[in-house]
Image (cartoon, helix red, strand yellow):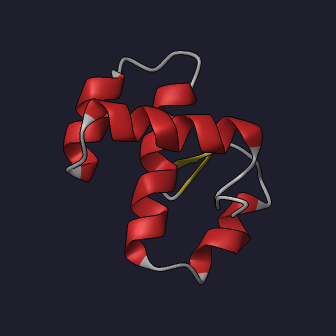
Amino acid sequence: MYIYKGEIYLEKHHIQLLKNEPGYVRQRYHAVAAVLSPKSTVTRQKAAHTLKVEKRQFQRILTFSERGNTRSST
């Protein structure tokens, strides 16, 4: 877990990767990182609300991020 300029990152190399991504990608990444942080008090419901998605949809985002898979394989 890394903090850079007040933002949480799961891996150090993610800092550079996210610099060129659109805002919504960075917002989703930081919501996921906040929930997965060991000492986090952010609930999945709060993170889903922040992203303006349903809790179930946020759970799907978490599932894909835990697998390292961001796109479906269809």
Residue depicted at 47% across the width and 64% down the height: 26
Tell me if residue 22 comes above or below residue 71 in the rendering.
below
In this rendered view, identify the residue nearer to me: 53 or 43.
53
In this rendered view, identify the residue nearer to me: 7 or 73.
73
Q: Quadrant of the N terminus?
A: top right
Residue depicted at 51% across the width and 53% down the height: 29
Residue depicted at 74% across the width and 39% down the height: 67
Residue 43 located left or right of residue 49: right
Tell me if residue 74 comes above or below residue 35 in the rendering.
below
Check the image and name the residue furthest to the bottom: 20
Check the image and name the residue furthest to the right: 13
How many circles with numbers are drawn on the protein?
0
Residue 18 located left or right of residue 52: right
In this rendered view, identify the residue nearer to me: 61 or 33.
61
- Which of the 4 image quadrants contains residue 58? top left
- Please provide percent x and percent y for residue 57: 36, 41
Residue 62 located left or right of residue 9: left
Residue 73 located left or right of residue 64: right
- Which of the 4 image quadrants contains residue 43? top left
- Please provide percent x and percent y for residue 36: 56, 27
- Please provide percent x and percent y for residue 73: 73, 60
Q: Quadrant of the C terminus?
A: bottom right
Q: Please indicate, yes or no, whether residue 33 appears anywhere in the rendered image.
A: no
- Please provide percent x and percent y for residue 44: 35, 26
Tell me if residue 10 comes above or below residue 70 in the rendering.
above
Q: Please indicate, yes or no, whether residue 17 appears anywhere in the rendered image.
A: yes
